[in-house]
Amino acid sequence: MRHFLLVVSLLLSPLALAGTVLENALWRVELDPATLALRVTPAGETSVQASSGVAAHAVSDLQAGAEQAAWQWDNGAYRLTARLEQRDLSLTLSAREPGELPLLRQPAAAMGKGLIWPLAEGHYVPAGNAVWKAFLLEQGELNTTQDLSLPLWGMDHGRFTLNWLLTNPYNNQLKWQADGKGLALSVAHEFTRLDPTAPMTLRLHLGDADPLAGAKRYRQWLVEQGRYEPLADKLQQTPEAKKLLGASHVYLWGNSLLAPADVRDWPLLVKRLRGHALKGLMDKEATQVLAQAKALNRYEQGVLLRGLNAAINQQARQAWQVEDPDMTRLAARYGELRSELAKDFAGALTGTPETWGSQTIQSLRDAGLPRLLLTLGEGWEGGLWHPEAIRAGVAAGYLVAPYDSYETALSASENPDWTTAHLGAKAYRDCAIVLKDGKLKTGFQQSGHYIDPRCIRPLLEARVKAVQAKAGFNAWFLDAYATGMVFDSYRDSASMTQAQNAEGNIDASRWISTVLKLPAGSEDGNASTAQGTLFAHGMQTPVIGWGDRQMTQDKQSPYYVGNWYPPEQPAVFFKPVPLKEPFRTLYFDPTMRLPLYQAVFHGSVITTHHWLFDSLKLSNVRAENELTQLLYNVPPLYHLTDATLKQRLPMIQHQDRFFRPLHQRLAAQAMTDFRWLTADKQVQQTTFADGTRLVANFSVQEQAGYVGRSVTALVVGEKPVVYQVCLLYTSPSPRD
């Protein structure tokens, strides 16, 4: 009996528990059930301490076999299972009660040769890189829905990789800490009181010597779960989306009612305005110009027209920025007001209202660009002012979309120019996210409230249908819905988990695409909210330096990105600026970029740059940006106005000739391989499902037979086609 008790005590001792082993022909996993410390040994390779473990828990009911173990923590507060499934170690935890639970601590030694990190498109971080170490330590607590584009990361160990996949991406917290000269990564999960029994599963994947191994496994997992949406299927559901294949993406500005060319007689316009009700709605500077006796110079004409357009917009909004907006009234008022103003200012304005406004769409038609996605940066108001221009763009074969938003609801007194966020008092009050402490979740830039997508859905459907019917848009852009920015809401009558928030966003995009048959896109395209979208802006170049003083506040800094002014051509979009360190290295050093996102979603979601940083914005990384974009087979993105088209058009045409036929061929295909072709990683190759290879040489000099700063397309059965960066192009510098 004494001998038996000794054996039992040894089996339950920390020493014995630490020796729980799962093993198959591919690898051996040593697991400590009390701490989740993990040591893995691939066949024929040295061991890696994948996790040094968390604070020990009391273990009970341990049952272990050759490839599976199950046990409990803390008298049944948590249940855990570990399964070895070929190349995957699956760890599943479920909780009895809500609470935050540390899961892993990945020590610095686990990183091996480098970190595979899904920041935006993806990056390879060499072990010991000081720039990246400082950057990651500054990040603070990260989540795996918005802060990472994919809920995974990997470690490069030369002849193999280890890759963590968090198949439940919600309510996870990651944090980097210094660990000697390297970095440790801690991982925790919150079991919320909204759904405390929802399990948390982590997968550790033993990958080949391939930096994309983890991303490929995640894609496979999505397919296995029925959660992968091939682009080919989306094109069948939404035939209009075929126009995305080969299309460059363009944001159009200057979408107000009147353009300078629409004024025939400035003195007469001034005279009429002095006695018109619009005078009382004009800003101070425009009012002062209106009052002066002398003839207006070109600058003063611009001030007056800007003030007049703003006043006209304000007058139109008075009809619908009310307690409970009537979407039919909203859509109708712009056309009514346009007709009224044509009578009031007859003789002062040229032609008829049908001809007023920006001519950029017509100019693009004349430029021989057959495939474009055009988005009105200022929202759907421009389409209601100029439905003729929208329908002309559609007739030319373009996709034309408005910027639209439903994630923040503003109060009646907040920012009237953010028209898409004025959703009425009911949405502001009844749809707001409620935090654990009962407070309402403040919206974007500390304005309004973030809102429940399920609550706002009826209004979204009503407004989209009403605006589309009047303006004729054949695509739609929903701001932030694909960013992975999701919340728990504790509203008594309508609680919502992060997973339900994500599903609400996805379902809205899917409704626009499949019911209205309008290709729907959004911001970023992060994995948790990527379903339902056809295109996304922000993966190739994400938002950079949002809180950096030099970039966003110091107007004397060479890195200042520019004002959100003038409204018809905001400097923030059109002013070329260099990107400061360390952001230049972190985001654009080609030797540390990886197409992780494309390894998952190429062939499902078409991504490009964020609108804050179009293809021409960052002057000192333009070549690297352009080559990476072409190597990954994603579209360029440009901002355009009537005034900038002439200077920007040659670049657009130059890239279109190379990009368009390749994207038409490859957009619906998986990216199957990526590799560095030279030791310095300056020459890189992507491969797609049909065997097409794209080779980029980032060096200014010829390497490995490829000319400097070029992309070579190697299509099976065809002659190579070479594209070189157009170094002669310069972007205009608008007044800040």
Image (cartoon, rainbow, N blue to C red):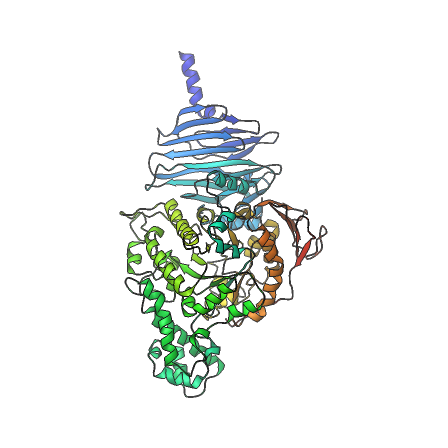
- Residue 293 horizontal/vertical position (percent): 41, 88
Out of 258 and 120, give the one closest to the viewer. 258
Quadrant occupied by the N terminus: top left
Q: Is residue 493 left or right of residue 485?
A: left
Which residue extends farthest bottom? 293
- Residue 172 horizontal/vertical position (percent): 42, 43
Which residue extends farthest top? 1
- Residue 269 horizontal/vertical position (percent): 41, 83
Residue, x 36% and y 60% (percent of image)? 463
- Residue 482 horizontal/vertical position (percent): 44, 52
Q: Image quadrant of residue 337?
A: bottom left
Out of 297 and 72, give the one closest to the viewer. 297
Is residue 253 in sight in this rendering? yes
Count all numbered tags in the image, as a single digit.
0
Out of 237 and 357, give the one closest to the viewer. 237
Quick check: 415 above or below 153? below
Out of 612 and 659, give the one closest to the viewer. 659
Is residue 563 in sight in this rendering? no
Q: Image quadrant of residue 171?
A: top left
